Amino acid sequence: MTGTGLLVIGDVVTDVVALHGGPARSALAVGTDTAADIVLRPGGSGANTASWAARLGTDTRILTRVGFDTADWHAAELRRFGVRPHLRVDPDRPTAVVIAMVDVTGERSMLTNRGAGGHIGTGDWDESLLEGVGHLHLSGYTLFAEPGLQLSRLAMAEASRRGVSISVDPASTGFLRSFGVERFIQETLTAQLIIPNLDEALLLTRETSAEGAAETLSLRYGAAAVKLGSRGALMARNGKLAARVPALTTEVIDSIGAGDAFAAGLLTALLGGADDEAALDAGRRAGAEAVTVLGGRPRILPSELGTNELYPLNTN
């Protein structure tokens, strides 16, 4: 490693979070109104991971592309948690928007418009971003449009040349299917660690168990940390199960960002020299905290509240 910092390449999103009172889609009344608590939150898988990692004490920076409409707000929100934002502002497109409908169990369904984030590319890259960095983390969303795929190739090649380790989060089963499973694997084999959830791990391997999927992925990448939600998480290395932790019991308000927080806790611990079990424990603790907060970022402390916020902050 050439440093101890973390560089995240990924998306920044404006999240519209609707917390409604029934189970899953059955609570949505077709053709009329459904009561819900609706808030705006800064989000995006890459930005969430960066925010959690910075809050956990890691020197973190993010490369992302935002729209002309909310660039200043998103930059301020990232700095609030200690992230060093490298935001490329798209003069022609708005920031990506996700409408997340969250049911009483904390499960969510999402409508996504990638906006400016879908146009990040090699023109946004600067080799100086890797100065002081020991690890590059890549959100899978970056690969799912051609400009971002080219950027991912460039960043991974430069990181490898400098001896910087690499991880990748597959991000979305829907986008994975459209992009192509084998294509995704081939494009990301430079990474030494993959951090999928269970659905993504099974899709990527055609295995039928978390253990089998983790072991298969670790044969290709070297290591695989599979997020199992209420069942905890496990890690495999070089084809063998290396560690496993159960989930922590907590009240689930909103599952948005839990996997991003897990990745941040895991990577922060690994960067600090932790073994696999300790790293999984750090990941599950961050994930457990994330599900108690509405939105995908860490809890906002009262002392951090501004007087001119663009959205109604909720400190629960």
Image (spheres, rainbow, N blue to C red):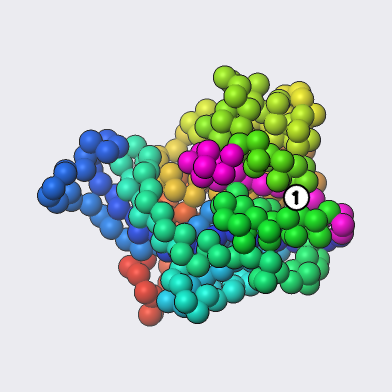
* Residue 111 place in picture, x, y as percent: 37, 51
State the SS at label 1: strand
The quarter of the image holding the C terminus is bottom left
* Residue 147 place in picture, x, y as percent: 62, 61
Residue appearing at x 57%, y 28% in the figure: 202
- Residue 184 vs residue 258, the one in the foreground: 184
Above or below residue 39? Residue 232 is: above
The quarter of the image holding the N terminus is bottom right
* Residue 94 place in picture, x, y as percent: 43, 71
Count of marks, rendered view: 1
Residue appearing at x 57%, y 51% in the figure: 144
Residue appearing at x 47%, y 59% in the figure: 114
* Residue 294 place in picture, x, y as percent: 39, 53
Q: In this picture, which residue range is highlighted in magenta?
A: 161-180
- Residue 262 vs residue 96, the one in the foreground: 96
Residue 148 seen by the camera: yes
On whether residue 315 falls in the magenta region, the answer is no
Find disc 1 in the rendering and name its residue: 166
